[in-house]
Image (cartoon, helix red, strand yellow):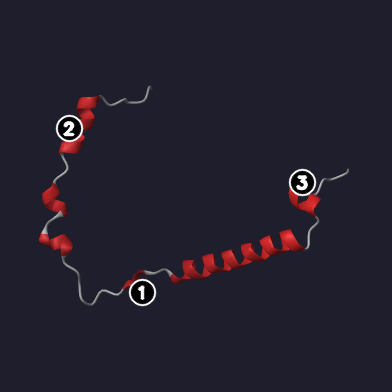
Amino acid sequence: MPPHISTESEKLSKSSDYNEKDVNSSETNKTDPNWNCFDHIIWFNVFWFTGLHIVAAYGAYLCFTDAKILTTLFGKKNST
């Protein structure tokens, strides 16, 4: 089945469905004084990505300090 290709009039009708009143309503602009951003952070992901960045930095350090320049540029070739 071929993909549905929307016409210019369909695109315009979809954009006219957008209601600015919903975005600027007073309900969406209210903030809860008890809202805490730290309650919404997934700490496992923070520690996981911090660890990944530390390992990547260590790998980059080893790549440019301990490896020969040809190994860094071309990698190890198997001679089997």
Residues at discs 2 and 3 in contact (Cβ within 8 Å): no
Q: Residue furthest right?
A: 80
Which residue is the site of mark 1? 38
Q: Using the numbered discs, state the Cα–Cα distance from disc 2 to disc 3 in whole angstroms.
A: 54 Å
Residue at the limit of the structure toward the bottom, as seen here? 34
The mark found on residue 74 in the picture is 3
Residue 5, placed above or below residue 35: above
Question: Considering depth in this image, is 64 or 78 the residue closer to the camera?
Answer: 64
Residue extending farthest to the top is: 2
Q: What is the number of the mark on residue 64?
A: none
Q: Given the image, on which type of amino acid does mark 3 rest?
A: Phe
* Residue beneath disc 2: 13
Q: Position of residue 4 (x, y in %)?
A: 32, 26
**How far is the residue under mark 1 from the one under mark 3?**
44 Å
Q: Residue at x 28, y 26 (%)?
A: 6
Name the quadrant containing residue 77.
Answer: top right
Is the residue marked by circle 3 packed among few (<14), some (14-19), or many (20+) residues within 10 Å? few
What residue is at 20 percent from the left and 35 percent from the top?
14
Q: Quick one: SS at disc 3?
A: helix
The residue at the point 35 percent across, 69 percent down is: 40
Between discs 2 and 3, the one toward the N terminus: 2
Mark 1 or mark 3, earlier in chain? 1
Residue 54: x and y, percent? 60, 68
Q: On the picture, is 29 further left or further right than 65?
A: left
